Image: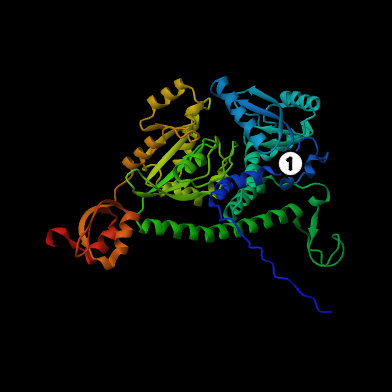
Amino acid sequence: MNRTYERSNDIDIREPLDFDQFDDLPEIGEMELAERQALRRVAGLSTELEDVTEVEYRQLRLERVVLVGVWTSGTVTDAENSLLELKLLAETAGSEVLEGLIQRRQKPDTATYIGSGKAQELADIVAATGADTVVCDGELSPGQLRQLEEVVKVKVIDRTMLILDIFAQHAKSREGKAQVELAQLNYLLPRLRGWGGNLSRQVGGRAAGGVGIGGRGPGETKIELDRRRIRERMAKLRRQIAEMTVARETKRARRLAREVPAVAIAGYTNAGKSSLLNRLTGAGVLVENALFATLDPTVRKAYTPEGRLFTLADTVGFVRHLPHQLVEAFRSTLEEVGDADLILHVVDGSHPDPESQLAAVREVIADIEGARDIPEVVVINKADAADPVVLAQLTAREKHTVVVSARTGAGIDELRAVIERELPRFDQEVRVLVPYQRGDLISRAHKEGEVLGVEHTEDGTILHARVLPGLFAELERTAKPVETV
């Protein structure tokens, strides 16, 4: 059967593409924040094992917790601020804080961290509140963890394990995951423990159960096998991190070869470093009101008010008593600070004790090779929420300070001017005649240097600019000084 089709006379009239509609699309940081908040822990919906010794470290799930701290020195305000920070860490890990306790002691108890009597009182509080985890504000030895768990009958976690758990949640890049896993294994190695049949020895030779000819005596225990496997995994991770460090060093060497000044943003966690990077460069990095929200370093290019090019690197945040396992694992990342020409030390102006934040960060920076001799500018962030008295005290005590608000943009222009003034000048001033066929040199001068004036003549372009030594050498070979023209 033959069918006839009629051609439609309708004309498909489409409206032109409106590119402004793409301005409303979320940035990279906003998408990462939405992805992170898409799946959240709900307190009280998990089933934990009653035997705390069977809780695997990698299956750590914090829910209803009680905080415990030992006040050994300083004022009661210092002790409360430290416990408040522990509360924020616990909430960042996804838990619900029920109680917070502080005990006054000259030093932590070597057996149970808080003493046998206080440990029993803590067990009563845990039973009354229905908590399933106790978080201690300090790094506990394996013996302290074991004995305190035997008293309170629930999981006991110290500050170091809590921070490692947060890092494990937030690590995103391949290098970051490897660094966090290395720190976890380094922490877990001396705290391995066995139970039941796992402590029985594996008999070597052909004998079964230690009976018969060929029984050569006891072999490795299960815990020794675990330790050996952990050491092998740690060695493999160190090799992988060393290989990934080569790529980072290559990028860094390329920037140094171009003689572009480098600025590193360092500071306490949740001080607003990523927000400041977004404000200065529009990087679109993840911003969240949480501790250790971003772990992976980000390097972006930026320009001073006069047009000078420099790189701005965002580094991992610091915290009081930062676990040395993390400092060692993230050493390749922290080298961005040691290779910088200027450090922007960001501090939260709205924090109750910003001076302790400054001291904690400087303690870590002092361990980075070459970082002590780098100029430092203290950037007091969150000025819109800070106490004016605290701001006045900080600006009076610190020599080089800038008060800004990354959220509102206040003080950003002043910060750009300070960066312009503090950055080392590698450039040289030139006034040369560039042939028209070498327009690429004029483009490089606009991109890499600071153009002071351009004049077009019959023979070429007269360029008056400040350029880096690499471009200066190229101009000397190609262009002619204006005085000899």
In which quadrant is the C terminus drawn? bottom left
Task: Residue at the far left: name it.
Answer: 484
Q: Image point 45% across, 46% down: which residue?
A: 281
Instruction: Look at the picture and state if 105 lies above or below 247.
Output: above
Q: Secondary structure at mark 1?
A: loop
Residue 66 shown left or right of residue 427 in the figure: right
Instruction: Look at the picture and state if 169 lies above or below 464.
Output: above
- The answer to whether any part of residue 72 appears in the image is no
Structure colour scheme: rainbow
Task: Name the residue tied to disc 1.
Answer: 61
Q: At which x and y percent is residue 269?
A: 54, 37
Q: At which x and y percent is residue 46?
A: 80, 40
Instruction: Look at the picture and state if 308 lies above or below 251.
Output: above
* In-front residue for pair 229/455: 455
- The answer to whether any part of residue 450 appears in the image is yes
Q: At which x and y percent is residue 186?
A: 62, 49
Q: Image point 46% across, 47% down: which residue?
A: 313
Q: Image point 80% across, 27% down: which residue?
A: 127
Give the quadrant of residue 251: bottom left
Amino acid type for the residue under numbered disc 1: Arg
